[in-house]
Image: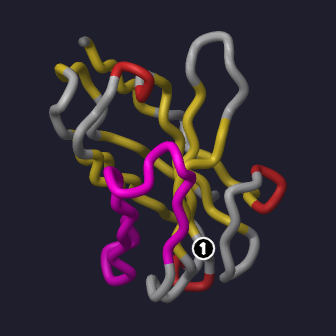
Amino acid sequence: QVQLVESGGGSVQAGGSLRLSCVVSGLNFDDHAMGWFRQAPGKEREGISCIISSGGRTYYDDSVKGRFTISRDNAKNIVYLQMNSLKSEDTAMYYCAAAWRSWCSLLEIDYENWGQGTQVTVSS
């Protein structure tokens, strides 16, 4: 059974930082690209960052580029999202997801396993 468990969310003031973690089990972690998505209240879920299976290439949505950093530890089956310079518009539920292939995109259709999410709230 594939499981993805996110942690690290919370409440922070604008300009602050948080580090999200996602522990993955039940699949060959280093065969799969990983992505981070978020869903704000009243909005559709959007892809914000992904990392290929080897960790050698990353992608970011323009809304987080330069502020967020995705990384992975294939020895520990963990993917991280370091979030700096947080803004109120970053407030959302954040989800990690495992892609069905080694190459990544920011499209939900490319992901087959999802975590339950962790809430991030940024106050201004």
- Please report the residue visible at 50 percent of the width from the left and 82 percent of the height from the top: 57
Q: Which amino acid type corresponds to the residue marked 1 in the rendered image?
A: Ala
**Residue 66 at x, y percent in the picture:** 35, 57
Q: In the image, which residues are magenta?
A: 58-80
Q: How are the colours assigned in the image?
A: secondary structure
Q: Residue 58 versus residue 124: which sits nearer the camera? A: 124
- Please report the residue visible at 62 percent of the width from the left and 62 percent of the height from the top: 98
Q: Residues within 10 Å of mark 1 (few under 14, many from 20)?
A: many
- Please report the residue visible at 66 percent of the width from the left and 39 percent of the height from the top: 46
Residue 122: image quadrant is top left
What kind of element bears circle 1? loop
Q: Residue 20 versus residue 90: which sits nearer the camera? A: 90
Q: Is residue 61 above or below residue 89?
A: below
Residue 100: image quadrant is bottom right
Q: Residue beneath label 1, please?
A: 33
Q: Residue furthest right?
A: 109
**Residue 114 at x, y percent in the picture:** 63, 47
Residue 78 is one of the magenta-drawn residues: yes
Q: Residue 46 versus residue 112: which sits nearer the camera? A: 46
Q: Is residue 83 left or right of residue 108?
A: left
Q: Residue 14 versus residue 108: which sits nearer the camera? A: 14
**Residue 44 at x, y percent in the picture:** 72, 26
**Residue 76 at x, y percent in the picture:** 31, 74
Residue 87 is one of the magenta-drawn residues: no
Q: Is residue 51 above or below residue 109?
A: below
- Quadrant position of the N terminus in the picture: bottom right
Q: Is residue 13 above or below residue 23?
A: above
Q: Is residue 100 above or below residue 119?
A: below
Q: Is residue 111 left or right of residue 76?
A: right
